[in-house]
């Protein structure tokens, strides 16, 4: 074990202080590391300041806990630790322990802006694509619009130029009828992809933000869904496109709130998709309009609990124009005005770190810092698709050590609270299905083990829990197979892992210490004030794993995956036998 600090409750007395307040921060130093001095370096008004830490206590395992006081002097106060040893000094930053200096961008961060709502830290998100989840009897009575092609529920999804025109007829009353599946799974928050009228089945080409698409049942259907969800203790999160509208939106015909900068004077569109004109956030009218939209749907009778912002990384950015932070802050204020416990999550499919830890997005969909490294560790030998979210070349097959390095690289450049408030996901309506990525149920089990035991808010794309497959975003959007056989073993694994997370303070709110990582094996500790757990995930069978960082007399209580095979070796080390793929979780005393 190495000296450790993170932003969790074990190491920071108040992770969301008021500007000007002082918090206490701790460093945990295992015995045998030779550390005899600890200094806190924090940045005040751009200038580094050093203060000395003092020994606070010694733990039963021989660890020494050092304590220092840290003023929250700026809205974001960066800090790190300098450790003195008999052989020299070491820096401890969010990047890890180094014998050399590293940039301040890897420093720990104390953020004074109001944080995400407390419920979000404990949530399990369930993503629903409305056209493909559940169908009510009323769907049969609705006329097919001129842009659409009707399909029967059990028709296969056919990729191609007409794929976005195909309607299966899922609607909001159909979702309400299937809410018991969500609650039986253990999820407590539903994220709905857009419910506004549009000319596609995905509805990211909004033709208005003032009403619910009649094909989904209209405004009253959303009221009924909200009421049914509320009765079950389930929250709803909406999906809002702030980067563009559809070309059928009345704004596009009547207002100048778009970019017209192409060489021929035509409008700019998202990734050159001609039906998605890009909004120009220089407009004060547009800003006021979106504030009203955000507030309206968070209020009764719809009572949404927050928004996921589509293409948040591109919103209000074009050439020399960059109002992204202003817009994020404006939307967050609108959320706060409507409901102080509202959540605002940004979609970034790559690096979101520059856009977090301000007064805007509470977190991001963590594709870069979670999804991609998990895919690269657990991917099948062959996968029937290329790249990752538009990236050319095949996914590399990497070891667990590379997974740890990737996750650390992204976590080191955001605050702990942004990391744990971001959504961890194995896939979404924009990606291949996790079963197709990893190739079989056992490796999906390993992926789900990471999803529900690592920091971050877990998000499940509806159907993953049933073992659905699909190699691209269209083929991954097949309707839920309610009347067909399910992979009940995978469903039970998801239910059990969600129940484990819900029952464990350490898995919901604990810090993270990496214990061991090699090609096929990953071991880590999650620790909170109330509990510590040891997690072991393997992608395939191999050699036993020997852990030497635990105290010799440590007794572990099995929480998941079977009490065996863990035992004490002849040298006093803790040995985990090498069967796999496997997910195992033990509670520490």
Image (cartoon, rainbow, N blue to C red):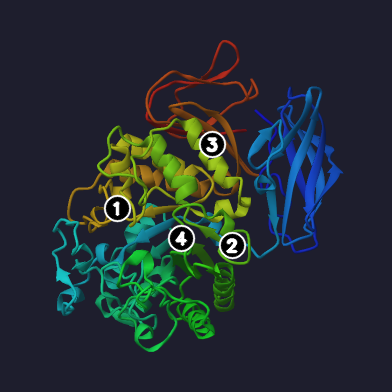
Using the image, tell me which numbered label, if any, was put on residue 116.
2
**Apparent side of residue 545 relative to residue 249 in the rendered image (left or right):** right
Q: Height in image: 291 above or below 380? A: below
N-terminal of the pair, mark 1 or mark 3, is: 3
* Measured Cα–Cα span from mark 1 to mark 3: 30 Å
* Measured Cα–Cα span from mark 1 to mark 2: 28 Å
Mark 1 lies on a secondary structure that is: loop
Q: Height in image: 61 above or below 160? A: above
* Measured Cα–Cα span from mark 2 to mark 4: 16 Å
N-terminal of the pair, mark 1 or mark 2, is: 2
Q: Is residue 23 visible?
A: no
Q: Who is closer to the viewer here, 462 or 561?
A: 462
Q: To which residue does mark 1 refer?
A: 463
Q: Is residue 276 visible?
A: yes
Residue 519 image position (x, y, % from top left) = 45, 26
Q: To which residue does mark 3 refer?
A: 405
């Amino acid at each position: 074990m190495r000296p450790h600090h993170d932003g969790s409750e074990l190491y920071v007395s108040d992770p969301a202080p008021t500007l000007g307040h002082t918090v206490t921060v701790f460093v945990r130093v295992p015995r045998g590391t030779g550390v005899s001095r600890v200094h806190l370096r924090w940045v005040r008004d751009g200038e580094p300041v050093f203060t000395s830490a003092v020994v606070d206590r010694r733990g039963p395992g021989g660890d020494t806990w050092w304590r220092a006081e840290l003023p929250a002097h700026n809205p974001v106060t960066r800090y790190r630790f300098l450790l003195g040893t008999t052989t020299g000094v070491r820096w401890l930053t969010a990047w890890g322990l180094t014998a050399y200096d590293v940039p301040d961008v890897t420093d720990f961060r104390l953020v004074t802006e109001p944080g995400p709502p407390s419920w979000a830290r404990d949530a399990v998100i369930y993503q629903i694509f409305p056209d493909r989840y559940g169908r009510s009897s009323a769907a049969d009575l609705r006329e097919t619009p001129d842009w659409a092609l009707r399909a029967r529920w059990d028709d296969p999804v056919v990729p191609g130029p007409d794929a976005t025109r195909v309607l299966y007829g899922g609607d909001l009353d159909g979702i309400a009828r299937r809410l018991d599946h969500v609650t039986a799974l253990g999820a407590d928050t539903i994220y709905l992809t857009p419910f506004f009228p549009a000319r596609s089945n995905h509805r990211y080409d909004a033709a208005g933000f003032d009403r619910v698409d009649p094909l989904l049942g209209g405004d009253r259907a959303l009221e009924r869904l909200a009421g049914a969800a509320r009765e079950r203790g389930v929250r709803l999160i909406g999906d809002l496109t702030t980067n563009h509208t559809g070309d059928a939106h009345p704004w596009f015909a009547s207002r100048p709130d778009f970019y017209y900068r192409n060489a021929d004077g035509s409008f700019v569109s998202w990734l050159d998709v001609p039906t998605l004109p890009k909004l120009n956030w220089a407009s004060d009218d547009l800003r006021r309009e979106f504030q009203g939209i955000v507030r309206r749907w968070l209020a009764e009778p719809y009572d949404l609990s927050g928004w996921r912002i589509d293409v948040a990384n591109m919103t209000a950015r074009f050439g020399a124009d960059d109002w992204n932070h202003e817009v994020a802050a404006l939307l967050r204020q609108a959320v706060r005005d409507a409901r102080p416990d509202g959540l605002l999550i940004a979609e970034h499919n790559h690096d979101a770190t520059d856009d977090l830890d301000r007064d805007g997005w509470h977190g991001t969909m963590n594709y870069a810092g979670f999804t991609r490294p998990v895919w690269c560790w657990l991917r099948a030998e062959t996968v029937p698709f290329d790249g990752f979210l538009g990236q050319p070349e095949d996914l590399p097959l990497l070891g667990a050590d590379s997974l740890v390095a990737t996750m650390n690289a992204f976590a080191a450049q955001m605050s702990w609270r942004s990391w744990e408030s971001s959504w961890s996901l194995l896939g979404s309506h924009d990606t291949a299905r996790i079963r197709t990525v990893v190739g079989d149920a056992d490796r999906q089990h390993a992926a789900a083990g990471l999803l529900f035991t690592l920091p971050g808010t877990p998000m499940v794309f509806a159907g993953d829990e049933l073992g659905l497959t699909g190699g691209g975003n269209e083929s991954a959007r097949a309707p839920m197979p309610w009347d067909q056989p399910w992979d009940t073993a995978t469903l039970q694994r998801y239910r059990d892992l969600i129940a484990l997370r819900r029952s464990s303070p350490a898995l919901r709110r604990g810090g993270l210490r990496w214990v061991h990582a090699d090609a096929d094996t990953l071991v880590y500790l999650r620790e909170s004030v109330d509990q510590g757990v040891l997690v072991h995930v393997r992608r395939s069978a191999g050699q036993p794993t020997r852990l030497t960082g635990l105290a010799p007399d440590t007794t572990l209580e099995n929480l998941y995956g079977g009490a065996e095979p863990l035992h004490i070796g002849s040298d006093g080390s803790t040995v985990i036998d090498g069967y796999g793929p496997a997910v195992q979780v033990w509670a520490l005393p």
